[in-house]
Image (cartoon, helix red, strand yellow):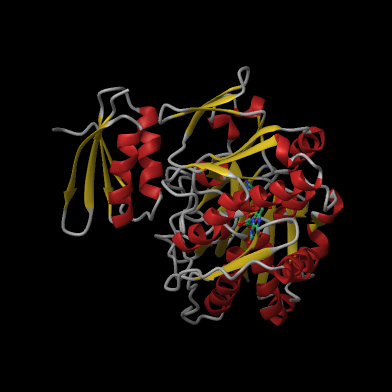
């Protein structure tokens, strides 16, 4: 029997497992193939929902589902925390037991590390996990005017466009509540433009200007003075705030770092086409966990999962795998309370955002619900 | 001039090389010389601009066969 272990129950792991289980249903039933998904969280989280949760537009129970309900019945689910990936013995060591594999899929995602910036945990808010989002939601509820700084600290981070979306939605949120006149919104970015992709900058920057949203570039926070409520940057500047919404630095999973499989940031060196981990014929990595220069986005994880599942089917059937990921990425960009645009690009095609409109916003809202079908592999 | 630290960021795209330099600047002492290798032309343009803004010294930008060596001295 061939054993496939999938590590991680986020978008990447779940969609890979469901795709593979569908394609290999007969082999699993005959006992020729075993598919096990190991993850440390019994819930699957829909992270894009945080952007709505903080403005009271989605509730907590709309952001998560029991993973058991999302997985194909042919996938064995193990709720356990992996502590080491032993590639020599083809084994994943977890807190409660070890799992042998013939093929391994690493889908451990990324995590935020606010502790890397002194003062950030004390004075900062974020919407990159549930706890942070709850705290930010109540800070926004209480906000009565003043200066809000939205600061991207460190790249790469999940969903590159989320800080821009937050900025636009916040502008409308404050306007609706009669607070925009009493408020300043400042957006900061580490590089020398407000976003990494020029076509997006060309569209977004004039929209920031129209809305009176200020921005700072080449802005790299070194520490947060929690008492004085100001950001001190590596460039020697200071920026005061009443409310700080930060995008904290990100890193790869601890187990990847502890197993010596990551680069300095804990990202796994992975072939950008085959999605095989460099140096291994029987290990794939996908989603946020890799070092591939594409967005850390759920859509990417989803498209990559289809490729990994197809290649695993070939591997398990004794055929050379030929499916390749072409860099395909799709991101909605909310540009206000009720309007949005989107970008779509791949390794060879740059993005071309369309004029923001209401329809795209409502498509995104519909997707927030339909997501659970895509995770199951039904859509 | 001998570099105290060499960062090979040739596989990385904009703004990856700049982010790597920023990390090194944080970690090294004043006076250290840091060298970034980048195959990304945008980074070879942006990094000197950042170095100027952040008050460090640009020792030089050297074009090698298929990449740039950007040498920076930490000044503060
Ligand atoms: C606020 C916000 C908005 C976003 N908006 C969008 C959007 O609009 N569109 C979009 O496409 N993407 C968006 N994203 C990004 C998207 O959520 C992520 O890119 C996606 O979740 C990545 O999926 P993944 O499976 O690679 O990683 P994750 O979803 O992070 O899953 C990793 C899994 O691995 C598990 N794990 C980690 N370590 C271990 C271990 N040691 N042992 C066992 N299990 C482990 C975790 O519990 C988790 O289940 C957004 C993200 C955020 C935070």
For the residue pair A10 and A328, the one nearer the viewer reads as: A328
Describe residue A154's horizontal placement relative to residue A180 as left or right: left
User: Residue at (46%, 80%) from the top-left corner?
Assistant: A320
Q: Residue at x 81, y 65 (%)?
A: A369
Q: Compared with residue A231, is residue A358 higher up or lower down, i.e. above or below?
A: below
State the image coordinates of residue B11 (x, y, percent, origin top left). Answer: 34, 56
Q: Residue at x 44, y 66 (%)?
A: A272
Ligand 1, image quadrant it occupies: bottom right
Q: Is residue B70 visible?
A: yes
Residue nearest the observer in this picture, A137 or B26: A137
Question: Which percent across, then down, holds residue A283?
Answer: 50, 62
Quarter of the image with the N terminus of chain A in it: bottom right
Judge by depth and name the residue closer to the eye, A55 or A20. A55
Specify the farthest residue to the top.
A227
Give the side of residue A125 with respect to residue A284, left or right: right
Q: Residue A237: which quarter of the image?
A: top left
């Amino acid at each position: 029997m061939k054993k496939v272990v999938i590590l991680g129950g986020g978008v990447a792991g779940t969609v890979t497992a469901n795709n593979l289980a569908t394609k290999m249903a007969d082999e699993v039933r005959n006992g020729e193939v075993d598919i096990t998904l190991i993850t440390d969280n019994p819930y699957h989280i829909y992270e894009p929902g945080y952007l709505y949760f903080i403005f009271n537009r989605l509730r907590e129970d709309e952001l998560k589902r029991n993973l058991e309900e999302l997985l194909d019945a042919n996938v064995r689910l193990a709720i356990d925390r992996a502590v080491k990936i032993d590639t020599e013995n083809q084994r994943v060591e977890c807190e409660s037991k070890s799992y042998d594999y013939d093929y391994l899929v690493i889908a451990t995602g990324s995590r935020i590390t606010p502790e890397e910036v002194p003062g950030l945990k004390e004075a900062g808010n974020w919407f990159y996990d549930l706890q942070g989002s709850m705290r930010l939601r109540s800070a926004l509820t209480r906000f009565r005017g003043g200066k809000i700084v939205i600061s991207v600290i460190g790249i790469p981070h999940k969903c590159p466009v989320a800080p821009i979306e937050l900025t636009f939605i916040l502008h409308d949120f404050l306007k609706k509540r009669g607070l925009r006149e009493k408020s300043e919104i400042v957006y900061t970015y580490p590089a020398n433009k407000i976003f990494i992709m020029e076509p997006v900058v060309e569209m977004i920057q004039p929209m920031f200007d129209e809305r009176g949203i200020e921005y700072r570039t080449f802005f790299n926070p070194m520490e947060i003075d929690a008492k004085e409520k100001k950001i001190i940057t590596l460039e020697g500047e200071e920026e005061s705030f009443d409310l700080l919404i930060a995008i904290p630095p990100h890193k790869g999973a601890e187990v990847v770092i502890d197993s010596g499989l990551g680069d300095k940031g804990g990202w796994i060196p992975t072939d950008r086409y085959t999605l095989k981990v460099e140096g291994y014929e029987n290990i794939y990595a996908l989603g946020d966990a890799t070092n591939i220069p594409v967005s850390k986005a759920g859509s990417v994880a989803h498209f990559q999962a289809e490729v990994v599942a197809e290649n695993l089917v070939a591997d398990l059937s004794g055929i050379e795998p030929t499916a390749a990921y072409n860099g395909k990425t799709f991101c909605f960009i909310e540009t206000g309370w009720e309007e949005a645009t989107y970008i779509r690009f791949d390794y060879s095609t740059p993005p071309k955002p369309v004029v923001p409109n209401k329809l795209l916003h409502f498509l995104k809202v519909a997707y927030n619900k339909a997501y659970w079908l895509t995770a199951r592999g039904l859509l | 001039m001998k570099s105290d630290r060499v960062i090979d960021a040739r596989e990385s795209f904009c703004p990856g090389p700049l982010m790597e330099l920023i990390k090194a600047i944080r970690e090294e002492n004043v006076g250290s010389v840091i060298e970034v290798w980048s195959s990304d032309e945008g980074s070879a343009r942006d990094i000197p601009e950042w170095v100027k803004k952040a008050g460090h010294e640009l020792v030089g930008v050297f074009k090698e066969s298929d990449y740039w060596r950007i040498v920076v001295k930490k000044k503060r």
